[in-house]
Image (cartoon, grey):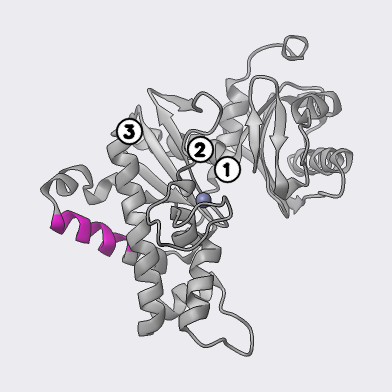
C-alpha cells in the first residue's frame, strides 16, 4: 500500500489524515503541537504521523508523501517557514527539510489558509468542475486562500489573499498590523468578542466568548444580535470584495468562527441579501449559491494537505 498523509499544524493541535492510493481515509488523529522548540515541534509532528500509521495498521515504509499546512508565512519553493508566531518560529526555519529528513518522504509545505483553500477546492470540484474559488478563513485572524485557473495563487511574495488587513474604515479600531479599521479588526473572533464586551454584560464574571455571542444572538438577544449583524455586514463585504476582485465561481467560508454553524450562516446570508437589495450589480455577482459555509464535519486543512502531498511527484533527493 502507498499511503499519503496530510497534516494541519496549528498553534495548539496538529491534525493528520492518512489516505491510501485511491484517496480513501485510513486514519485520522489529532495530537497536541509542541511549540517549545523547533526540534520538539518536528518530533511531535513525526509522532502524530506514526500514530496515524499505527491506527491504520501501516508502517513508515508504506508512506510515500506528506503535505503540511502551517499558520504562518511559508516559502513553498525553499520549504522554509519565514515566520509562524503561533508555532513559536520567529526566525526562518527549514521545516520541510527537517520533516523530510525525519520521515524519509517528500514533504510539501504551504500556508494553512492556502492549504484549507486547496481542500475546499477539491471538495467543491467533486460536485461540479470549478476553475476558481476563494476560501475565506475567519478565526483569530482573517485571510483568504485563492485558487485561480485550477491552481493555488500565492502572489509575488506569498501575501495574496491577506485581506484581513485591508482597511475598510479609517475611523475603526486599531488593528494588530498598526492600521485602523481593518476587516480583521471588525470581524475576526477576538474583534467580535471585544465589541461584545463593550455592549453586553459579562457572564459569571468572565467576558463572553465569540461562540457565546453567536449563541445569544441566535436566541434573540438584541445587543448580541447587533454585534453579530455588524460582523456579518463586514464579512458580506469581504465576500463581495473577493468576488469583484477575482470573479471566482465560489466563495467558501471556514475557520473557527464559522463553527457557530447556523448562528454564523443566517446573519451572513441576511447581510448578503442586504447588499443584493441595494445593488443590481451585487444581485448579479452574489447569488446565494455562490457562497458556501464549510460543513462542521469537513476538515479543509487536512484534506487540502493530502492533496498537496498527492501533487508531490519528485524524488526526495531532488527536493533538497
Ligand atoms: Zn490590520
User: Which residue sits at x=71%, y=47%?
Assistant: 85
Q: Mark 2 sits on what residue?
A: 119
- In the figure, is residue 34 to the left or right of 300? right
Q: Are marks 1 and 2 in contact (CB under 8 Å)?
A: yes
Q: Is residue 37 visible?
A: yes
Whichever of labels 3 and 2 marks the residue nearer the N terminus, that label is 2
Residue situated furthest bottom in the rendering: 204
Quarter of the figure with residue 229: bottom left
User: Contact (CB < 8 A) between labels 3 and 1?
Assistant: no
Q: Residue furthest left?
A: 280
Q: Work out how far the residue at label 3 is from the one at label 2, CA to CA, in angstroms.
A: 19 Å
- In which quadrant is the N terminus drawn? top right
Q: What residue does disc 3 label?
A: 246
Q: Relative to residue 15, is residue 106 depicted above or below?
A: above
Q: Nearer the viewer, mark 3 or mark 2?
A: 3
Q: Which residue is mark 1?
A: 301
Task: Assign the C terminus to one quadrant of the image.
Answer: top right
What is the magenta range? 268-278
Name the one closer to the observer, 226 or 221.
Answer: 226
Looking at the rendered structure, the secondary structure element under dot 2 is: helix
Side of 4 relative to 273 (left or right): right
- Residue 175 is a magenta residue: no
Label 1 element class: helix
Residues at marks 1 and 2, CA–CA distance in whole angstroms: 6 Å
* Circle 3 Cα neighbour tier, 10 Å, few/some/many (<14 / 14–19 / ≥20): some
Q: Which quadrant of the structure image shows residue 132?
A: top left
Place residue 269 in its image quadrant. Answer: bottom left
Work out whether residue 314 or residue 156 is closer to the camera in this orientation and state it: 156
Amino acid at each position: 500500500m502507498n499511503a499519503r498523509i496530510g497534516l494541519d499544524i496549528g498553534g495548539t493541535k496538529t491534525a493528520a489524515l492518512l489516505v491510501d492510493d485511491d484517496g480513501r481515509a485510513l486514519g485520522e488523529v489529532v495530537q497536541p503541537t509542541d511549540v517549545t522548540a523547533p526540534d520538539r515541534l518536528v518530533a511531535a509532528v513525526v509522532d502524530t504521523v506514526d500514530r496515524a500509521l499505527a491506527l491504520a495498521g501501516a508502517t513508515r515504509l508504506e508512506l510515500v508523501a506528506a503535505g503540511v499546512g502551517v499558520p504562518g508565512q511559508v516559502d513553498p519553493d525553499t520549504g522554509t517557514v519565514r515566520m509562524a508566531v503561533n508555532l513559536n518560529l520567529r526566525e526562518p526555519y527549514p521545516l520541510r527539510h527537517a520533516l523530510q529528513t525525519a520521515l524519509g518522504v517528500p514533504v510539501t509545505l504551504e500556508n494553512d489558509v492556502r492549504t484549507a483553500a486547496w481542500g475546499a477546492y477539491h471538495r467543491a470540484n467533486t460536485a461540479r468542475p470549478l476553475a476558481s474559488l476563494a476560501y475565506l478563513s475567519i478565526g483569530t485572524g482573517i485571510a483568504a486562500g485563492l485558487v485561480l485557473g485550477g491552481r493555488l495563487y500565492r502572489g509575488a511574495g506569498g501575501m495574496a489573499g491577506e485581506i484581513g488587513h485591508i482597511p475598510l474604515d479609517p475611523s475603526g479600531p486599531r488593528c494588530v498590523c498598526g492600521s485602523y479599521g481593518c476587516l480583521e479588526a471588525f470581524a475576526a473572533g477576538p474583534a467580535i468578542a471585544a465589541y461584545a464586551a463593550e455592549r453586553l454584560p459579562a457572564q459569571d464574571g468572565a467576558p463572553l466568548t465569540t461562540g457565546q455571542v453567536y449563541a445569544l444572538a441566535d436566541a434573540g438577544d438584541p445587543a448580541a444580535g447587533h454585534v453579530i449583524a455588524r460582523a456579518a455586514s463586514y464579512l458580506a463585504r469581504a465576500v463581495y470584495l473577493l468576488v469583484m476582485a477575482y470573479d471566482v465561481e465560489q466563495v467558501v467560508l471556514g475557520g473557527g468562527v464559522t463553527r457557530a454553524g447556523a448562528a454564523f450562516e443566517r446573519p451572513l446570508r441576511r447581510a448578503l441579501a442586504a447588499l443584493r437589495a441595494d445593488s443590481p450589480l451585487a444581485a448579479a455577482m452574489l447569488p446565494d449559491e455562490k457562497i458556501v459555509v464549510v460543513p462542521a464535519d469537513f476538515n479543509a486543512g487536512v484534506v487540502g494537505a493530502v492533496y498537496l502531498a498527492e501533487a508531490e511527484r519528485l524524488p526526495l533527493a531532488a527536493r533538497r
